[in-house]
Image: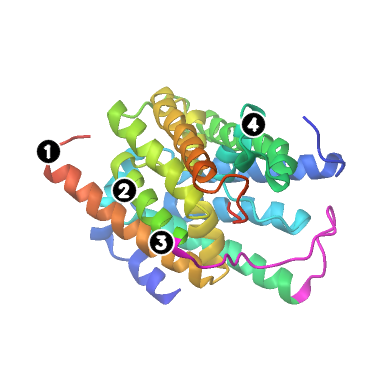
Amino acid sequence: MTALAQLAFAPELFPNGVAQYLIGGFFVGFGISVIYLGTGIIAGNSTFLETSLSYVSKLPRFNIPRFVESRDWRVLFTASIILGAVAYKAIFDPSIFVTEVQWWRLLGGGVLVGIGTRIGKGCTAGHGVCGVGSVSRTSLVNVALFVGTAIVVALGVAAMGVTP
Amino acid sequence: MSDGGRGPYFTLLIVAGGLIEGFGLAYSGMARPEVVLDFLQLEDFGLLLVMGVASITAGLTFWGATTFGDRAPLTGKSYTRRVKSMDRNVAVGGVVFGVGWGLSGICPGAGYASIGVGNYQILWAMAGMFVGAYAQGYWRALRAPGDAGSVTAD
């Protein structure tokens, strides 16, 4: 917490200020907390990708009972995340944002994110927020690996002159 | 759309939690791959604050519920922390996810929120994520036919 406070007061590390990050981060954790307190479910975000495949695939991996049982509310959860972002835009910044990151980076990165989060048992929400919040050693290892690897890759891609 | 017999309050809570999380992802800038890439290129450390504050908020909730709580009112499920077993997949998956995240600046939750801010380009990443999720399931089926996989994941 102290380290976090020190970070927050180092303006050269935060050229765009800190308010949106602190407030946004609180809402991310609060949304997860609301579901948890009512249901006991720790709702990660990447399981939606795999459970939804049970609607269209007969592969046994996608049709294990835990997936089939949770797929409906995960669709609803994901749709609500989209609508939550729509609400933010409507209230604070009514314009359309379209990324300039190139399509092949999004597609190729997306494939690897799909593989890696599912093999690795979670994503930035599951491991990064809920697992770290649970002080889970497994999650801390996973987060250190994906953050460290991503920094190396992002710096490498930038060094090769790919922008954005 | 069935609620698995859990009732309308379960559905309402899932919607409320999703709305709040999606709002937070958009507010924090994480719905914009550029902001994530700025962090990964060590130009703006805001993402650390987002993950830090979100995990502290969730962590305090987990700690409070497991210390003072009993069972979740809407499901009867016991309150637990999120502790997954450690194995080689956790390490391999973390590295593969890291390469993808570093390349694209996008992860699943932020990807959903990105659709909500109007970023239709993000559909490339969403299509990729489904292809990747399918590929790993197909690969697991080839590798261990008949084994549906016992690992858990979020």
So how many labels did they put on this image?
4
Query: What's the distance in space between the residues labelled 2 and 1, CA to CA?
Result: 17 Å
Amino acid type, callout 4: Lys
Same chain for labels 4 and 1? Say yes or no: yes
Same chain for labels 2 and 4? Say yes or no: no
SS class, disc 1: loop
Amino acid type, callout 3: Ala
Residue B60 picture location, percent across and down? 62, 69
Residue beneath the point at 34% across and 67% down: A7
Circle 3/circle 4 CB separation < 8 Å:
no
Query: What's the distance in space between the residues labelled 2 and 4, CA to CA?
Result: 29 Å
Query: Which residue lies under the disc numbered 3?
Result: B91
Q: Say whether residue B72 is magenta.
A: yes
- The extreme front residue here reads B145
For residue A92, above or below residue B118: below
Which one is nearer the viewer's eye here, B61 or A90?
B61
